Image: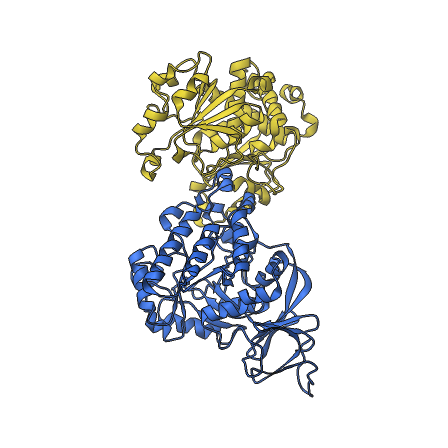
Chain colours: A yellow, B blue
Amino acid sequence: MRTMARGGQGTEAGEEGAAGSFRHLLSVADLGADGIAEVLRVTDSFVEVSERAIPRVPALRGKTVVSLFFEDSTRTRLSFETAAKRLSADTMTFSASTSSVKKGESLRDTVETITAMGIDAIVVRHGSAGVPWQVARWTDAAVINAGDGWHEHPTQALLDCYTIGQARAGAASDVEKVFAGLRVAIVGDVAHSRVARSNVLAFAALGAEVTLVAPPTLLPPSLAGWPVTVSHDLDAVLPGAEVVYLLRIQRERASEALLPSLREYTAGYGLTRDRSRLLRPDALVMHPGPMNRGVEIAAEVADLPCSVVTRQVANGVAVRMAVLFLLLSHPAQLEPGVAVDG
Amino acid sequence: MRGGTVVDAGGSRRADVGLSQGDVVAVQAGLDAGPGVTVLDAGGCVVAPGLVDLHAHLRQPGMEEAETVESGARAAALGGYTAVVAMPNTDPPIDGAAVVREVLGLGAKSACDVRVAGAITVGRKGEQLAPLAEMAALGVRLFTDDGHGVQDGRLMRRAMEYGSALGVVLAQHCEDASLASGGHMHEGEWSSLLGIGGVPAEAEELMLARDVALCRLTGCPVHFLHLSTAGSAALVAAAKGQGLPVTAEVTPHHLTLTDAAVASYDPVYKVNPPLRAQADVDALRRGLSDGTIDAVATDHAPHPQEAKEAAFDEAPPGMLGLETALAVLLTDLDLPVERLLALMSWQPARIAGVSGAHGGPIVPGRPANLCVIDPAASWVVEPGRLASRSRNTPFAGRRLTGRVRHTVLFGEPVVVDGQAQR
């Protein structure tokens, strides 16, 4: 049986090896355990930068980072742009709603036009799976996947790994020790979730034991080769779970015959106040945001101390700084100390 | 035609073939070509009846940027075809006498004998029967709403009842629209990994099973277009086992590619029905050998480059096929050439109702619609050198073995030494 490989296989886009040598960040699987660990180590340095009075270093001065967002995502875009600015890169935003895409320009034309402006990285968000792989074929800039359809969202997985490491070990340097055998439950709409696909790949690469908890209609049609177990009984999974990762449920799922109603979903799969009593004392509750309070997570639960949702957001900037730094800084500058002090 | 091995439904023999006035006039070894006679070298080649494609999208009228009848017919001739059936999903669609006449007229001076399939329903909308008798009177033999299946079972039943009196064949693109909705590739392991909505095999098989039942009810011959699943092959085999008048075709790409190709996210691999799993490919290949499947058809579906440079789920489905079909199958399939020619020439000729002119046998007195195949010629598929106006071949860069050297249409050489003459 095939292992859970990522998309984009057979293309020149996905570069192997440690993060220091990769050209693009398309799938989190391209990094492997070593690459993820390297990104998290570099993230540690940038968390420190973010806490400074003037949270800015000149590491990417003169570099230009373009946000190419075909799908609205203010949170992810702001996180990337903040990360780029803290590294002193110039940033540009290309938003499909205000651009020539509306005038019928092809995806390839758009990418080639942006590339011709002389840029160093393109951060791509698109509602269709695979677009970052296509973009990488049409540009010589570094391409960062900021979410492609239901497929992947690698920086979300990296910031989730960082957040888990931070919460459970205090620092990311022990990340592989933290994840070995860690029992993670990913709950909700796995089928339509780029966050779930990237997190399964990342958590499993680091040695975690992942359980998907969802009604069959919200699981992918085939899980052959996925390094996961499956449950339809959240109550049975919660007492053993060290991390409970709740996915956002789109309200339209109820109108697509995937669910009878959101109410029934909450009854079976929501982390309600009653159900939260089944959580281990040391469990972490995570969510990629934005949360539907009262649907997949009760308002009170979202605000419990075990919830690290706001820490996920805060770490997002530092993780994206690490990714941009590793992709764009010259190999000679790879020592984080050199760049951060510069 | 000198020095070849003549292969037709009757077998194979070493012979030269003499042509005159559009017909075959002599088939024998050591023919003497008199002065002023053009000699086509067939040394080392198979001289076969011209191929017949049951399923080509020639895009005219309405989508001339992608293909025209002229360019599509040239591509067909280069691929060894002497007859193609043009699909009716044009703009406007071929759903009445006027557009039938227009397309037949466009094909009249082309490099191939262009026939047309008519739509089953007005505008291919699946709501109201198109004037089948009016089109049948112009020689239309196949009717299909290809691109969509006819969703309404009652309407399909009526079309088959009505058609059963006309001596026509109803051809179905089997796809239950509700089950296929939101799908852009085969539903399975790869769609799950890639995060692309899937089309389950059952979307095809359910409509196929329905139409087998309607065939039993009405007695109207049904042709199943582009089978893509193991289950479809089994349903067709069962229907044939009951003696029902059903036939089926499969495309070269469904015989040689799988859904794993979509991992590149290159929309050149997007096609409808989608590329399926290896088990489906294996079953379809068995269906070719055991007689379940009657024909290989290209489903040649040109699209302009920019349309395929979109996101996978936003790109239109379809692949080129006419210029590569024979070579791909000679290269990738382990079928004797006689069997392959049956599937690509005389069997589809019967389904299309063109056996009088196409598909052989190669004997004196028959129309000279022939192709000469060099089974040893090795070549690389270069999209920019294809005669099609479009470039969307999934076989770009592939080295293939076997190539059409000459094609003769009603006695006229339309391809000589691999070069189109029209």
Q: Quadrant of residue A122?
A: top right
Q: Is residue A79 above or below residue B115?
A: above
- The residue depicted at 67 percent of the width and 21 percent of the height is A338
Quadrant in which the N terminus of chain B is drawn: bottom right
- Residue A339 is left or right of residue B196, and the answer is right
Camera-side residue of B144 and A137: B144
- Residue B254 is left or right of residue B151, and the answer is right
Q: Quadrant of residue A35?
A: top right
Percent x, y of residue A15: 63, 36
Percent x, y of residue A340: 62, 20
Kindly give the residue lying farthest to the front in the view shown.
Answer: B242
- Is residue A317 among the parts visible in the rendering? no
Q: Is residue B186 above or below residue A302?
A: below
Camera-side residue of A192 and B274: B274
- Residue B170 is left or right of residue B251, and the answer is left
Q: Is residue A310 above or below residue A94?
A: above
Kindly give the residue lying farthest to the top in the view shown.
Answer: A281
Kindly give the residue lying farthest to the bottom in the view shown.
Answer: B35
Percent x, y of residue B385: 62, 62
Camera-side residue of A180 and A322: A180
- Residue A189 is left or right of residue A28, and the answer is left
Count of numbered circles on the image: 0
Percent x, y of residue B315: 47, 50
- Is residue B7 among the parts visible in the rendering? yes
Camera-side residue of A124 and A190: A190
- The residue depicted at 58 percent of the width and 24 percent of the height is A206
Q: Is residue A97 above or below residue A238?
A: below
Quadrant in which the C terminus of chain B is drawn: bottom right
